[in-house]
Image (cartoon, grey):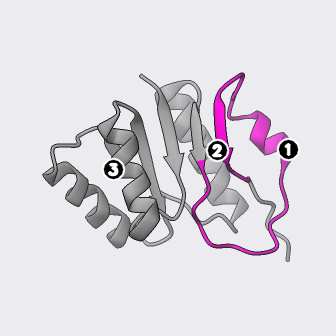
Amino acid sequence: MRCAVVTGANKGIGLEICRQLASNGVMVVLTARDEKRGLEAVAKLHESSLSNVVFHRLDVMDAKSITTLAKFIVTHYGKLDILVNNAGVNGAIVDSEALKTLNLGDSKVCNYMLLKNHN
């Protein structure tokens, strides 16, 4: 089964992207900064008989949060096939070394960035 991560996915376009991916048999990791809202979004999808969606908290501006998500993906799914960056963040810096840890290989990357936390 293919695996996708959708950032900023607890509502709107992100939630609909999750719905469409899950409807097409993709295992979806729905991410959001707010755990309560993220879990509520997953519950809505489960109510629609889409059981192949899980929540993982992610703050795309926090390096530790990004690393935790990357480890979760590698541990549970081995690799990532689809990445969708829906989180609205400006001034992002791509961390190419962190991106390599996701073991993307020749997967389909929609638009995703791993960020360094700059103080």
The quarter in which the C terminus is drawn is: bottom right
Question: CA–CA distance between discs 3 and 1?
Answer: 29 Å
Q: The residue under label 3 is which amino acid type?
A: Arg
Instruction: Say which of 84 and 99 sits in front.
Output: 84
Give the number of the disc on residue 19.
Answer: 3
**Of the residues tagged 3 and 1, which is closer to the observer?**
3
Q: Is residue 49 left or right of 98 when viewed as pictured?
A: left
- Residue on which disc 1 sits: 96
Amino acid under label 1? Answer: Ser
Number of residues whose C-alpha sits closer than 10 Å to that of mark 1, classed few (under 14), some (14–19) or many (20 or more)? few
Does residue 93 show up?
Answer: yes
The label number, if any, that marks residue 24 in the structure image: none
Q: Earlier in the sequence, mark 3 or mark 1?
A: 3
Q: Secondary structure at mark 3?
A: helix
State the quadrant of the N terminus.
Answer: top left
Decide whether the magenta segment is chiefly helix, strand or loop: loop
Answer with the quarter of the image where residue 115 lies.
bottom right
Does 107 appear in magenta? yes
Q: Position of residue 71 (x, y in %)?
A: 60, 39
Residue at x 38%, y 69% (from the top left corner): 11
